[in-house]
Image (tube, rainbow, N blue to C red):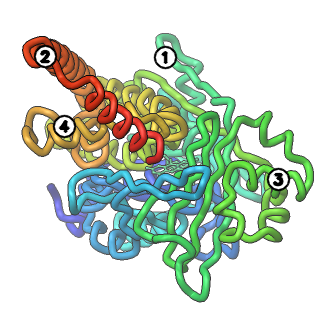
Amino acid sequence: MEDSTSRSTKKKVVAVVGGGLVGALNACFLAKRGFDVEVFETREDIRKAQIVRGRSINLALSHRGRQALRHVGMEEKIVSQGIPMHARMIHSLSGKQSPIPYGKKGQYILSVDRANLNKQLLSEADTYPNTKLNFDHKLHDWSAETGMMTFVRPDGSKVQLKADLIVGCDGAFSATRKQFLRRSRFNYSQTYIPHGYMELTMPPVNGEFAMKPNYLHIWPRNTFMMIALPNLDKTFTCTLFMPFEDFEKIATGDEVIEFFQKYFPDAIPLIGEEALRRDYFRLPAQAMVSVKCSPYHIHDKCVLMGDAAHAVVPFYGQGMNAGFEDCIVFDEVLDRFSEDLGAVLPEYSRVRVPDDHAIADLAMYNYIEMRAHVNSKWFLFRKHVDNVLHFLMPKTIIPLYTMVTFTRTRYHEAVQRWHWQNKVVNRGLLLSATGAAVGGSYLLLKNPPDVNKLLLSVEKIWTRLVTK
Ligand SMILES: Cc1cc2nc3c(=O)[nH]c(=O)nc-3n(C[C@H](O)[C@H](O)[C@H](O)COP(=O)(O)OP(=O)(O)OC[C@H]3O[C@@H](n4cnc5c(N)ncnc54)[C@H](O)[C@@H]3O)c2cc1C
C-alpha cells in the first residue's frame, strides 16, 4: 500500500458522496492509497455546527467496525472514547435486572457517540494532503457515462465536477443510487418496518450513571421494547421501539406516564416524570427502513457503500459496522486487482452483496429476539447450551452473536453455520432427552421407587420452579 504522502499526479480522482460515518472513513482508506479524494457532503461542517442532527445519539461499535478503524490508525482513539458494554441487562416488568453476557469474558461492544465519531473521522480525512472536504454540496445528479456530477449549494447555485470513480456513501435515501434505479438489471427493494423509534434521555443521579453503565439495558415487552446505551457524560440514551400506531395512541402527558407505569415502571424515576411528559412529544417517532439492492456498481464508474447500498434495521447493531467493513473489503479487492477499477467494482459487488443481504435479514430477525425471545426460558436455555458448547468446542460451535459481533466471519457464512449448528445442537438435545427418558424408565422399572417419596420430590422441584 502506498504512503499517503507519495501523491502521484497519475492517481485517479475519487469522489466520495456523503461525509457521514462511512463516507468519512472511506475517504481515509482511499486517501491512504494515494487517490485524489474529494468528499461532498450536503450538510455544513458538523465540526463547526451548533446542532448536529443525526439518526441516533450513540451506537454500538464492535469488531468489524474496530478492524476498519484500525486500518486507518483510528481504533485506539475511538475505543478510548467509548463505553464497554459486556452484557445485555434485561429489565423485567417487576424491575428485576438479569444480565445476559454478549460473549466470553473480556468480549464487549462499545457505546460510542455518533456525532463525535463522525467529527473525528472527518478530521482524520482532513489530515491527508490528497483529500478535500466539500461541505454544503448536495449531489443532484451524475452521469454514469462521463462521471460528471452536479451539486446544488445552499444558495441554489449549481457546481459541476468530474471524477474517475464515484463512491456513493450518501445513506439510506442515496441520491447516487437514483442513477442505478434508472438502469436495467438493477435489483432494489425497500421495506419500512411498522415500528418507529424515539429517543429519551436518562440523566445522571448525583453525578453518576443512573443504572449500571457497562451494559446495554433492554426492557423487552414482546411487541415493543426500550433499550438504553450509556454516554460519556453519564447520561443514558433510551430508545423506545414501538409500532407507530401505539406511539400515536399516546396523546397526553398523563397517558405517557400511564404507559410507562404499565410497561417500564422502573424507568420513570430515572428518566423523571416531567422529562417524560415533555420529551415524548418533542419529536415524532422516526421510521426505520431496510434497503437491499444489487449490484453495487455501474461499470468502473460508481460503487455504493454503507447505508446507500444496504440500510439495515438497527437491531443487530451492525449497520455502521457493516458499512465500515465495506471499506476494508473494497480496499482488499483494490489490492487484489491492482486498482483496476473495471475488475474491482464487479468483484466488490460479487463478494459483498451476499454478506450485506445476510446482515439485513439477521437484523430483522434480531428485533424479534431482542423484544420477545429474551423473555422465553427455552431461548435462555438454548443460549446457555450454545455458550457451554462453545466453551467445550470453541472451533466447532460458535454462537451466532459471537460470529457476527466478535469476528469477521462473512455474514452469509455465519448464517449458514448457525443453521447447521442449530440442527446439530437440537438433534443432540433431542437424543439426550430421549436417552434420559429411556434410561430413567428402565431404572424405574428395575427399582420401583417409594411412590410417596417420589411425589414429595416432585412437589419440591415444582415449588422451587414456581417460586423462582
Ligand atoms: C436508531 C438507530 C440506531 C443505530 N444503532 C446502530 C448501532 O448500534 N451500531 C451500528 O453499527 N449501526 C447502528 N445504526 C445504523 C447506522 O446509523 C448506519 O448504518 C450508519 O449511519 C450508516 O452510515 P452511512 O455513512 O452509510 O450513512 P449516513 O450515516 O446516513 O450518512 C450519509 C451522509 O450522506 C449525506 N448525504 C445524504 N444525501 C446526500 C447528497 N445528495 N449529497 C451529498 N451528501 C449527502 C448525509 O448528510 C450524511 O452525512 C443505527 C441506526 C439507527 C437509525
Secondary structure found at label 3: helix
Answer with left or right where residue 270 lies relative to residue 410: right
Which residue sits at x=55%, y=51%?
92
User: Circle 1 is placed at which residue position?
Assistant: 186
User: Circle 4 is placed at which residue position?
Assistant: 398
Q: Is label 3 within 8 A of ligand 1 (CB to nearest ligand atom)?
A: no
Secondary structure found at label 4: loop
Camera-side mark, 2 or 3: 2
Q: Residue 59 location, x and y as percent?
A: 48, 57
User: Circle 2 is placed at which residue position?
Assistant: 435
Under mark 3, the amino acid is Glu
User: Circle 3 is placed at which residue position?
Assistant: 258
Ranked by sequence position, the earlier of labels 1 and 3 is 1
Q: Is residue 356 above or below residue 104?
A: above
Which residue sits at x=68%, y=30%?
194
Whether the residues at callouts 4 and 3 have beta carbons within 8 Å, the answer is no
Ranked by sequence position, the earlier of labels 2 and 3 is 3
